[in-house]
Amino acid sequence: MKSYTTRAVAFVASAALLALTACSAGSSTSGGPSAGGDQSLSLGLVAEPASLDFTTTDGAAIPQALLGNVYESLVKQDESGKIVPALAKSWTVSPDRKTYTFDLVDNAKFSNDKPFTAADAVFSINRVKTAWTTSLKAAMDVVQEAKALSPTQLQVTLTKPSNGWLFRMTTRIGAMFSETGVSALATEPIGTGPYKFSKWNRGDSIVLQRNDAYWGTKPYFQQITLKYFKDPTALNNALLTGTINVITTVQAPEALTQFTSNEKYQVIEGTTNGEVLLSFNNSKPVFRDIRTRQAIRQAIDHKALLDTCFAGRGKLIGSMVPPTDPWYEDLTGVAPYDLAKAKSLLQASGAAGATLRLRLPTLPYATSCGQVVKSQLEQAGLKVQIDQLEFPAAWLTTVLKNADYDMSIIAHVEPRDLGSVFSPTYYTRYNDPELQQLLAAADAGDEKAQLDNMRKAGRRLSEQAASDWLFLLPNLIVADKNLTGLPQNAITENFDLSRLARS
Amino acid sequence: MRRLNPSLVAGGVIVGVIVATALLSFVWTPYDATFVDPSVRLATPSWAHWFGTDKFGRDVLSQIMVGSRTTLFVGVVAVGVAAVIGVPLGVLAAMTPRWPSELIMRTNDLLLAFPALLLAIMFGAVFGASTLTAMVAIGIASVPSFARVIRSGALQVMRTEYVLAARAAGRKPFPIALRHVLPNVTSLVTVQASVSFAIAVLAEAALSFLGYGTPPPTPSWGRMLQESQEFLFSAPRLAVFPGIAIALAVLGFNLLGDGLRDRFDPKLEDRR
């Protein structure tokens, strides 16, 4: 009886929605190649890139689609976080830890048919310093000189020992470009990867074709379509109707039960690097007082927030370090939920009653969490005004570039991004000489010094309340049952398509 | 004494209830409509929460009550914009010679051919999603229907003997429009306003559903529907209540419009 009632109610609800959904269905389901062919695969993603050029445009969506798939780097990270060979077969480090010598593969070719040589590697490394405009380029500042010893041998000299540099070379900073292939990076990426860029249907999808001249193991799928969905329900429905084969990141976790109970699908749940920040604009007078920042952290009931806006999936973290990093420690106890304490801190700092602008990107998790944050901060005595900014274009310009905001909510998915996110020049405008010292000591020191100092840096950020860390995004993937090669944990900034296959 | 018109009564009652709810929500709602209370999230209807709670633990009834404000506000402003622009245009088209009249009406037709939602989405994309952009866009999209209806009414009035007499007596067009034409098309304006109001309610809901209308956390029926999508299988009631509210509001204003038309149009009265 109960199920009949439920079904009847569901039917009425569907009918009520039908007229309105009819307006939105077109954009998300039309145009794409149908999923399910053995040689082609469609993946559903959330945020479409603003451009295909990650040398000048911020945003995680570009390396997610292109790095490791179209572009390759000298070294890459495996799923456990270990640095392993890619375009460099092997490398040696000098005893003073300042000179790296890479032996490169000799049979790699760019998709414009030019061979990949050490000269291209020198060009790519130098170009980060001269032509890149994103803040991540700072990771290459430590390079003194890059030199081609032979077509397959590259020598890089650093100004000082750096633990971070080789790791950064696994990220977009390390992508290898062809000297003749950088004229139209925003629309025509050219790399050595297992896939070639084919076309970009703006607002809808990016299509990649298998690179049949690839130097390594050729991928299984001939064609891969990355389809972008703004609406989390449309993304779920696309899988249910067979428009896509994979939901790369589930954005409507409440609706996950419809897949877990269906034998056609597999659900993968792991962890990521995606720290969801309630970021503060530390250059604003209201945030200069540490008590205000601490009050905001203590006014938020993080467990309740996670339950409410992400169905309890994900992990609570108290700082910018995810559990997959070696220097992780549980810092959730640094700012426990304590409404009375938050109120008294706000009174003491004089911020009680202040109005803060919470400028949210139009991303599902940000919209949801923003409403919880507003309600909880208002209970502590702050006024919160929510603005929604179109993601990526409007949010990147207003918040990330111009820092015209008080607070925002965004997931930072770049690996080991503690130093780059909390810097005076980034949108957090966080200027803390002590943190910079810890990071410098971690980068220059030996393995133990790195571990100790990074741990201290993580703790310092949390104690200084440089921002609030709402939670760590889970890696939630739903895919066709017979698909293999999907990552359990998403700890790199790319989505590796080359390992995908059908069993 | 005239017989009571059932459409008018039913429409009047429904609209009256919605207006009363909106007014009441200014002074009282069962709970703060935007208060997030995770301890009662997704509660089923009960004495404490008559319509249950949503995924944030917000009281659905309180949201529907406050949402009626948004709906009415959007309706009033959108219809206001449409009437303020559309009525003078219609009268002007009826009173001017052939070519200016043609110019006005063909421009009008151009705008009429443009889908209202598309226009509103364009406005949202350019000026940012907000209740204001939604209201203005819906208003502008409703201008052509006002202009067209008012022009036909005004043309009839222009052929009446008293207008001909006034013109023969040398009265200027502006006083004629103000004194003779406008008072005689008021009933048409009222009926058209009522019908446009229903369209505006639906358009606001659709825009908020698509994320181009009222931004969160201000309660809006359309966005409540959007947020309920995730729960269509696990808690379908979340879609039912705002769905019923929208349907009732649209029905109410349409019935009111029908009733008013019957009341003002003596020809229809005779036919019954």
Image (cartoon, coloured by chain):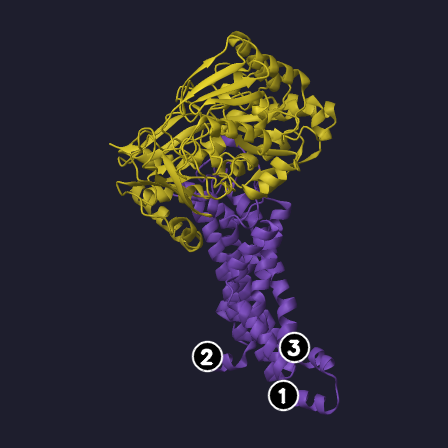
Chain colours: A yellow, B purple
Residue matched to label 2: B272
**Chain where mark 2 sits:** B
Is the Cβ of the residue at disc 1 closer than 8 Å to that at disc 2? no
**Chain where mark 1 sits:** B
- Residue at 75% across / 86% down in the picture? B171
Is the Cβ of the residue at disc 2 closer than 8 Å to that at disc 3? no
Front residue of A236/A343: it is A236
Tag in front: 2 or 3:
3
User: Residue A179's x, y, as percent?
Assistant: 49, 35
Q: Amino acid at mark 3?
A: Leu
User: Residue B207's x, y, as percent?
Assistant: 52, 53
Q: Quadrant of residue B109?
A: bottom right
C-alpha separation, residue under disc 3 versus residue under disc 1: 17 Å
Which one is earlier in the sequence, the residue at label 3 or at label 1?
A: 3
User: Which image quarter is the N terminus of chain A in?
Assistant: top left
Q: Is residue A499 above or below residue B243?
A: above
- Residue at 29% across / 33% down in the picture? A501
> Label 2: few (<14), some or many (≥20) within 10 Å?
few
User: Residue A184's x, y, as percent?
Assistant: 50, 43
Residue matched to label 1: B160
C-alpha separation, residue under disc 1 versus residue under disc 2: 26 Å
- Compared across the picture, whether B88 is left or right of A80 comes to right
Same subunit under labels 2 and 3? yes
Tag in front: 3 or 1:
3
Q: Is residue B127 above or below residue A378?
A: below
Q: Is residue B191 above or below residue A276?
A: below
Is the Cβ of the residue at disc 3 closer than 8 Å to that at disc 1? no
Residue matched to label 3: B92
Q: Secondary structure at mark 1?
A: loop
Does the rendering let one see residue B13? no
